[in-house]
Amino acid sequence: MSEKLLDEIHCVMRRRHYSIRTERSYSMWVKRFVAFHKMKSRDDLRVRWMILIHILDHLPISCS
C-alpha cells in the first residue's frame, strides 16, 4: 500500500480534528479495503474509493 495514500488520510483526519484512535481505526479499515480489492492504484477502484470516503464521512464519531 502506498505510504502517500496513508499520509493523505492522516492529513485529512488531523485537519478534521479526529482523535488518534479514530485515525488509527480508519487507517486500518482503509488498509483492509485496499488489500481485499487488490488495489494497485487509485484509478483501479475510483468508484469503490469514493464509496469508502462517503462511508467514512458518515460514521458516527466523537471529537475529543
Image (cartoon, rainbow, N blue to C red):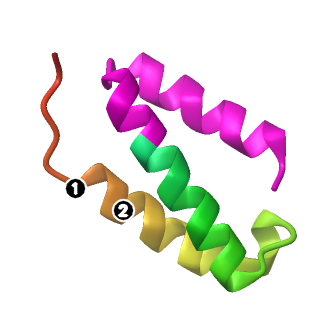
What's the CA distance linking mark 2 and mark 1?
A: 7 Å
User: Can you tell which mark lies on residue 54?
Assistant: 2
Asked if the residue under mark 1 is in contact with the one under mark 2, i.e. CB atoms within 8 Å, the reply is yes
> Residue type at mark 2?
His
Mark 2, residues whose alpha carbon is within 10 Å: few (<14), some, or many (≥20)?
few
Front residue of 54/64: it is: 64
The picture places residue 42, in percent across and down from the top left corner, at 76, 65
Residue at figure coordinates x 34%, y 36% from the top left: 22
User: Is 51 rendered above or below residue 22?
Assistant: below
Residue 61, by quadrant, is: top left
- Residue 40 is inside the magenta segment: no
Q: Is residue 46 left or right of residue 57?
A: right
Residue 47 position, x and y percent, is 58, 79
Q: Residue at x 44, y 29 (%)?
A: 13
Q: Which residue is under mark 1?
A: 58
Q: Nearer the viewer, residue 21 or 51?
A: 21
Please provide the residue range marked out in magenta.
1-24
Locate the N terminus and report the quarter of the image it occupies. Answer: bottom right
Task: Please tell me in which quadrant of the rendered image residue 46 appears.
Answer: bottom right
| Residue 54 shown left or right of residue 27 in the figure | left
Q: Is residue 44 above or below residue 19?
A: below
Q: Which mark is residue 48?
A: none
Tell whether 44 sits left or right of 26.
right
Circle 2: element type: helix
Name the residue: 63% across, 59% down. 31
At horizontal 35% and vertical 55% (from top left) the residue drawn is: 56
Question: Residue 20: x, y in percent?
Answer: 39, 23
Q: Amino acid at mark 1?
A: His
Main secondary structure of the magenta stretch: helix
